[in-house]
Amino acid sequence: MAVVAATALATPLLLAASPHPGRPASHDPGKEAAKLSRELVRKASARDAYRHLQQFQAIADSTDGHRAAGSLGHDASAAYVYRQLQRAGYKVSYETFRFTYTETLAEKLAVVTPTPRDVTIKAMTYTPSTKEGGLTAALVAVPVDGTTGCEAADYASATFTGKIALIKRGGCSFAEKQAAAATAGAAGAVIYNNVEGVLSGTLGEVAAGKIPTGGLTQEEGEKLVADLANGEVTVSFEIRELQEDRATRNVIAETPGGSAARTVMLGAHLDSVTEGPGINDNGSGSAGLLDVALKLAKSKSDPANKVRFAWWSAEENGLIGSEKYVAALSEKQREQIKLYLNFDMIASPNGVQFVFDGDDSDKVGAGPGPEGSAQLERDINEFLDGKSKPHEGTDFTGRSDYGPFIDAGIPSGGTDTGAEGIKTAAQAEVFGGEAGIAYDPCYHAACDDLDNIDLGHFDTNIDVIANAVGTYAHDLRSLTRPVTPDTGSGTPGSGGSGGGLREGHGRVSE
């Protein structure tokens, strides 16, 4: 889902700086917030949240190895989260919706001539399927320009009928590229990345799919382009995907008390891909959020503002759960949500501490978030600075569940630790780990299990969640406090860009 520059959509923040209605005049929201945030940061922990990860792993182990939306694994994960919250005293509900469940049945590409070799390919979500066994056809490269493969004219220089189109990423959506290739007569499309890392993409919806389509790494794509420069290349190509109409559900929990007119919302997606158990993606965010929610219930605090938590489903299919939720909100309900914070992949084993760039001070990709997003970024950065934890900004790419909230004009932010993006040498110096490999080498893979968790990143981000919950449960005044302009130095810890690829994580559409 593409994120629009949402500043114009932002709803005005009507945040009361005076004491909360119904509370004693002596009530100090700042003191209440500081007290609760300290308590939650002290009590919430990676150790306790890890127990939830163990439960998610056990569920995946007993249900075909994954917890994808529409599967028994996700249903069991949602039931586990629901029971924990219900016992803690939250008002808990399921939000059920229907969607198209997808599961990869085959993803194979091999050069047949002139020199046989296998090529790693990833089936795109909502792709049409080849026949079982696939097809053998000539490969033809689409000429590279700023909008490679996006327009009919891109296919005029060669005959694509019955052939496989090799297309470089960029300039338009994957759906548009494969549709243009289909119009030119191509029997299939392979789209290769324009940056390092795997390409885990989506065509957006079933109706958009015209021909079987898969994604390649930049390296694999450029090798094929080089092969074609030396003569004809024939490939064997098989992409098959199961697509079924199924039901799944979000889990929504909120504090019994607190003013609904000042609702504070935090979320994480609970579903995995079908390729693996999804313990980092996104068991980590789900478990961290659950641990903080349970610690809030045990605190016996009486939040002045309503705190609402969400565990989204079908994020991996295109943010469907969060989109359904936001679309169903009335105008009044949207206005009541004063902020949304998202936590997705918060324990990557080779990770970097990323904070969403609410004010667009990094000048990378999408523009700023709705009014108040800059303050959310500033507040997280200040907390991390207080813990002497380095951090970098990351763009609102629209690849996780904050996207629908931004589009609705709701101030948004959050953290992650990286997905398929490649760690730079500069990042390795600051954050440790290994340069030249992915932040999460097990991204969307079977090895995304309990061994794929960095407990240090996990604990830091749980502290971020705990501090945000404790603070905003009582005090929203920081959302109207002006943000000091960033110098744009790019120094990790300053909120600047810090260098390197910034990728969100869900399946990309362009």
Image (cartoon, grey):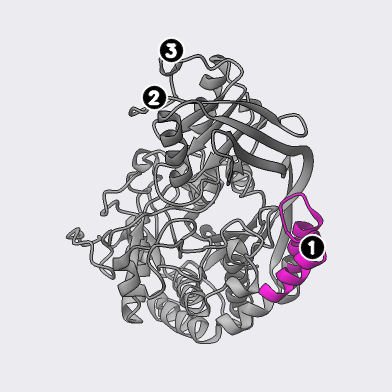
For the residue marked with disc 3, what is the amino acid?
A: Ala
Q: Residue 243 placed where, x, y %?
A: 75, 37
Q: Is residue 78 magenta?
A: yes
Residue annotated with mark 1: 76
Q: Residue 407 placed where, x, y %?
A: 46, 41
Q: Is residue 495 magenta?
A: no
Residue at image point 67% right, 56% down: 271
Depth check, front residue: 440 or 196:
196
Q: Residue 151 placed where, x, y %?
A: 43, 19
Residue annotated with mark 3: 156
Q: For the residue carrying disc 3, how many other residues have a C-alpha within 10 Å: few (<14), some (14-19), or many (20+)?
A: few
Q: Residue 105 placed where, x, y %?
A: 74, 43
Q: Are marks 1 and 2 in contact (CB under 8 Å)?
A: no
Q: In the structure shown, which secondary structural element does the residue marked by tag 1 occupy?
A: helix
Q: Which label sits on residue 399?
A: none
Q: In the structure shown, which secondary structural element does the residue marked by tag 2 occupy?
A: loop
Q: Earlier in the sequence, mark 3 or mark 2?
A: 2
Look at the picture and state if 83 lies above or below 314. Answer: below
Look at the picture and state if 203 lies above or below 105. Answer: above
Q: Quadrant of residue 253?
A: bottom right
